[in-house]
Amino acid sequence: MYEAIQIVHSYWAYLVVLVVTLATINALIGFFTKREYAPKDFRVSLFALIVTHLQLLIGIIIFFVSPTIMWFTDGVSVSDIMGDPLLRLYNVEHPTVMILTVVFITVGYSKHKKKLTSTPKLKMLAIFYTIAWLLMLSRIPWANWF
């Protein structure tokens, strides 16, 4: 079961990176060029929200079934986890930063809907999606991707 979920999580991550990158670039270009907010902007930002939430759900499942997660293993102390960079990445840094990524995307999406004109809408998306994008890229286990 773990292997199947891991494969889904890994391949879905490519889609997440692609969509969040596109949504971030779209929001930044829209904000800096002062163009009008269009239905395309809404769809792109919504799709980024959806794919990141689905990835989070898959990641939560993996957190509880993965053999690399040591929090639930007898005889493994927190200092052992925090002392090993690879264990720290999988047990602490990756889950925490990815949750923050989803939080920033969710907050940005929610705040942009409350704005009434194009510039503030695109500004909210640009700020929050850029922060989320940078966080996401900072904690992807790149060694496993290539």
Image (spheres, rainbow, N blue to C red):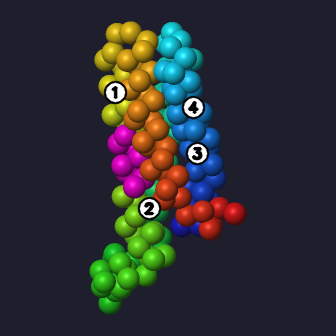
- Ranked by sequence position, the earlier of labels 3 and 4 is 3
- Residue hosting label 3: 17
- Residue hosting label 4: 25
Q: Residues within 10 Å of mark 2 (few under 14, many from 20)?
A: some
Screen quadrant of the N terminus: bottom right
Residue depicted at 54% across the width and 38% down the height? 20
Screen quadrant of the C terminus: bottom right
Q: Choose top left, top right, bottom left or bottom right for residue 104.
A: top left
CA distance separating discs 4 and 2: 23 Å
Q: Which type of secondary structure does the marked residue at label 2 adopt?
A: helix
Q: Where residue 94 is drawn, which disc sits there?
A: 2
- Ranked by sequence position, the earlier of labels 4 and 2 is 4
Q: Residues within 10 Å of mark 3 (few under 14, many from 20)?
A: some
- Residue hosting label 1: 110
**For the magenta stretch, what is the residue range?**
97-104
CA distance separating discs 2 and 1: 24 Å
Labels 4, 2: front one? 4
Q: Choose top left, top right, bottom left or bottom right for residue 10.
A: bottom right
Q: Amino acid at mark 3?
A: Val
Q: Which type of secondary structure does the marked residue at label 3 adopt?
A: helix
Please say if the residues under marks 3 and 4 sit with CB atoms less than 8 Å apart: no
Q: Residue 46, position in %: x, y?
A: 48, 27
Q: Which type of secondary structure does the marked residue at label 1 adopt?
A: helix
Q: Residue 128, position in %: x, y?
A: 40, 35
- Ranked by sequence position, the earlier of labels 3 and 2 is 3
CA distance separating discs 3 and 2: 14 Å
